[in-house]
């Protein structure tokens, strides 16, 4: 059973601090990794994709991938109240399916 | 450009009834995916269309679920007869390329409640 694991949270982070979200996956052949943000009652929205080991930065967001450890993370710098949402980690299984984690609820404290 | 749209936004039906969900993907997106999120669980893949063809329907729970995409445009997902465990949020997503290669754009979802 291919799985994506995330801490469900909630993760509370003071405004302006760095929020760190973590995800592990079970399928070693996975090559594509995604972070989605989902506001309550809304649809998931892609915020980062990463395909190779290392860091990928986009504005305040940095995705980190370590395929040897089967670990992917998302850092949000200078956290804002508008970053409060559920963050979904998703992994491509190699057969054109994406598997999602249950998501981590992030709460930015003003 | 319009995003992915889904209809209805909510549906409440009784066990044994039939419900049809509709998804209109972004124009030009050949790939269309259906997902479902049951309360407390992760979003799970149901099936994938490439144009009008079913590429992968391995996630469909059972034969009470029927998906179609006639003409390769909009898609419908019919549940007949509905059971209590079918309750959840059904998301549709579309993309230009395959799931691992290009961004999937999600619709707002249809919240299905089976009583």
Image: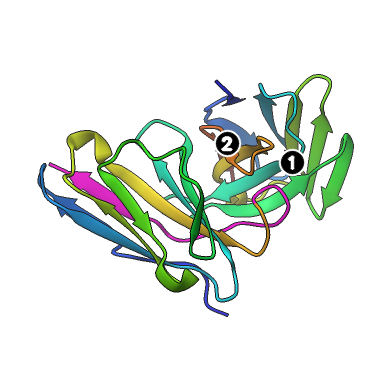
Q: Residue at x 64, y 35 (%)?
A: A13
Q: Is residue A29 above or below residue A62?
A: above
Question: Subunit of mark 1?
Answer: A
Residue extent of the magenta highlight: B99-115
Q: Is residue A13 above or below residue B99?
A: above
Question: Subunit of mark 2?
Answer: A
Q: Residue B96, labelled with which disc? A: none
Q: Position of residue B91 (x, y in %)?
A: 43, 52
Q: Nearer the viewer, residue A24 or A3?
A: A3
**What residue is pinned by disc 2?**
A99
For mark 1, give the secondary structure.
loop
Q: Residue at x 66, y 21 (%)?
A: A26
In magenta stretch: residue A62: no
**From this viewpoint, which residue is outermost toward the right?**
A54
Mark closer to the chain start, 1 or 2: 1
Q: Quarter of the image containing the N terminus of chain A?
A: top right
Q: Residue A32, labelled with which disc? A: 1
Q: How many marks?
A: 2
For mark 2, give the secondary structure.
strand
Q: Residue at x 61, y 56 (%)?
A: B104
Q: Position of residue A109 (x, y in %)?
A: 58, 41
**From this viewpoint, which residue is outermost toward the bottom?**
B1
The Cα atoms of the two marked residues, 1 and 2, are separated by 11 Å
Left-right relation of A42 to A29: left
């Amino acid at each position: 059973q291919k799985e994506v694991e995330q801490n469900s949270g909630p993760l509370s982070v003071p405004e302006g601090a760095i929020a760190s979200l973590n995800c592990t996956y079970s399928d070693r052949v996975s090559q594509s990794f995604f972070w989605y943000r989902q506001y309550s009652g809304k649809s998931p929205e892609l915020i980062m994709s990463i395909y190779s080991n290392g860091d990928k930065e986009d504005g305040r967001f940095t995705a980190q991938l370590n395929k040897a450890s089967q670990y992917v993370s998302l850092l949000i710098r200078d956290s804002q109240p508008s970053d409060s949402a559920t963050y979904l980690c998703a992994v491509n299984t190699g057969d054109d399916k994406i598997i999602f984690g249950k998501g981590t609820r992030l709460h930015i404290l003003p | 450009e319009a995003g992915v749209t889904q209809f209805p936004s909510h549906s409440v039906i009784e066990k044994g009834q039939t419900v049809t969900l509709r998804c209109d993907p972004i124009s030009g997106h050949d790939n269309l995916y259906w997902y479902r999120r049951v309360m407390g669980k992760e979003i799970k893949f149901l099936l994938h269309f490439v144009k009008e063809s079913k590429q992968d329907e391995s996630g469909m729970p059972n034969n009470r679920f029927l998906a179609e995409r006639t003409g390769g445009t909009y898609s419908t997902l019919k549940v007949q007869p509905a059971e209590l465990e079918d309750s959840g949020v059904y998301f549709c997503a579309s993309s230009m390329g395959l799931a691992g290669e290009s961004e999937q754009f999600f619709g707002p979802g249809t919240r299905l409640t089976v009583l």
